[in-house]
Image: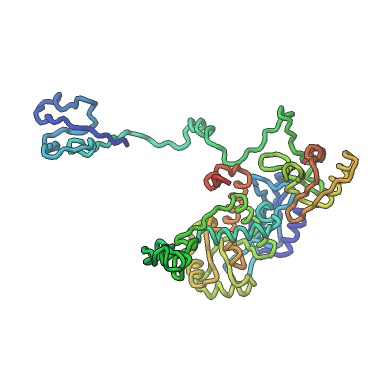
Amino acid sequence: MSFSLINAIRKLNISTVSQIRLISSGSTEVSSINSHSNSDLNVSQKEWKFPPQFTKPREVWIENLDSIDEKKLGLFELHPLVYAVLPRIDIIHRNVIWQRKFRWVSWAHTKTRAEVNGGGRKPWPQKGLGRARHGSIRSPLWRGGGIVHGPRSGKTHFFMLPFHLRIHGLTSTLSAKFAQDDLHVVRNLELPTEDPEYLAELIEKRNWGPSVLIVDDNDYAPRNITVATENLPHVNIIPFYGLNVYSMLKHDTLIITQTAAERIEEKILQHLHSNTMPQQAKFKLNQV
Amino acid sequence: MATVWRSQCAFARFFVGKTGRILNNAADLGIKLTPESISVSTTRSYSNYSHSPLVKKIKEQYDFEIEKNPPEWAYVERLLPLETIPPVQPKETYPSGWIPPKEEAKDLPYFMPRTKNHELPIYLIITHKGQRKVSMLRKLEGDIWLMNDLIKEHLQTNFNRYIETRVHELGRFIEVKGDFVNSLREWAYSKGF
C-alpha cells in the first residue's frame, strides 16, 4: 500500500520538499526514496497516541497559499475517529440549536396587574349595582389590564449540551466537511501580499466556495493574512480553540493549518479517551 | 510572603538600649522600632484590631529557590490524576476475568472496537418496566450486514429459534430483540474483539 502511494506521488512530480507520513501497521520501517526531481521524499511513521484500529486513517494533501495556483506540498494523515466518523445530522442540528440558544437572553417584557399603572381602587361597590364584581380595573380580565403569564424581561435560555454530544458534533461536522471535499490542510498562512484581492482570486480560482473559515494553531497569525481577511467579510480566521459547529456550517470551506489539524485531533482524541464525568458534573442538573 | 499584624509596644519610646528594642511577643523580623514610627491617638477607639493605628502591616520574606524537575517531583506526579485512561498492562491472565482483544480480529471484514474503558460495547436496554429487553451492539465498523448474518446464525444455533435483529447503518449499531448479552459477548470474544 505504501509502495503504490509513493508511485502515485512520483507521478505527480512534487517540486518542494515534503514530509510524508504513511501508515504501516505495527512496523517502524523508514525508507528513503529517490524521486525524479531533486527533492527527497522522507517517509516517516506518524506516532498516534491512540492508533487507529480498523478504519484506515484519511489522507489529505498539504496545500499552500503562496501562489494562486495550488501546489501540493505533501501528504498528511488524519485520524479516523475525528475525520472519518459517519456524520450524525441530528447531533449536528442539536449542536447548532444549542449554540444559538444558550447565549440568548429574551428581553420581551409585559406588566402584571401589580405593575400596570392604576387599579388600586375597587371600581364600584360589590353589591347593589347589578354589574359584575371587580376589585381593580387592571385585573387580567379587563382591557388594558395586566398579563398573567406573559414574558418577563431578562429570561435566560442557558443550558449545556452533554459533553460527548458536543464532541460528536465537532467530529461529525469535520468528517462531513472532509467527505464533501470542503476541508483543506495548509502548511502555513503566509501570503505574498496583504491585498484582499489576491485572497479573493485564490479562492475563486481554486473553487473554494464563497465563504472560507481559516483555522490557525494559535492566536497570532502573519500580518498579510490578517489584513486580507479583515477586509473580506466572508473570509474569517479563528484559532483552533474557537472551532465550533455553527461556524463550520456557516462557512462553505474550511482551511486548517497542519499544526492546527494535529492539535484538534490531539484534543478530541484526549477527550474521547478520558473520563469526562468530572467535567460534566458542573453542568449536570440537580433534579432530572 | 506572609503578612503579619503586629502591634508595637506603646511605651517603646522609653526604651533606649538594644534590649529595649526587642519586642516581647516574638522575634523581630527586620522592623525597626523608632519613636517616630509610633503615633498613638487617644481620641478615637477602634473596634477592629487590625485597623487600629498601633498595628502595622508586616510582610515576611523568605528566601526560596526555583528548581525545575527535581528528582522529588516523581512523588508528586504519581499523586496527580491521569489525563486519559491508560492502556491495560499485558498479562497472562487477569483475576477479574477480563479478556484482552486480539490483533487477528483486525483482519476480519467487520470490527467491534473496545470502549474507552477497554470493555465490549454490548449493552442490555430494559424498558417498559422490564417487559422489553434489547441487546445492543454499538460502535460497529466494516461490513455490518455480514456481521448481522453471523450473529443471527450464532444465536439460531444456540437458542434453536429465529431471533429478530435491527441493523442501523448510519448509527453503526445492531439491536437484538431479547436478552442475549452473555451469548453475544462469548461470540465477540471468540472472534477476538
Horizontal side of B131 relative to A97 (left or right) equals: right
Quarter of the picture containing the N terminus of chain B is: top left
Which residue is more in the foreground, A104 or B143?
A: A104
> Picture coordinates of residue B181 (x, y %)?
78, 40
Q: Position of residue B151 (x, y in %)?
A: 84, 45
A55 vs A168, left or right, is right
Residue B49: quadrant of the picture: top left
Q: Can see residue A109?
A: no
Q: Is residue B54 left or right of residue B91?
A: left
For the C terminus of chain B, the image quarter is top right
Q: Height in image: A15 above or below B81?
A: below
Relative to B168, residue A286 above or below? above
Q: Residue at x 53, y 55 (%)?
A: A241
Instruction: Give the farthest residue toward the front.
Output: A128
Tell me, yes or no, if residue B49 can be seen here: yes
Q: Where is residue B155 shown, x and y percent of the image?
A: 86, 42
* Colour option used: rainbow
Write down the quadrant of residue B40 in the picture: top left
Number of marks: 0
Q: Position of residue A170 (x, y in %)?
A: 61, 56
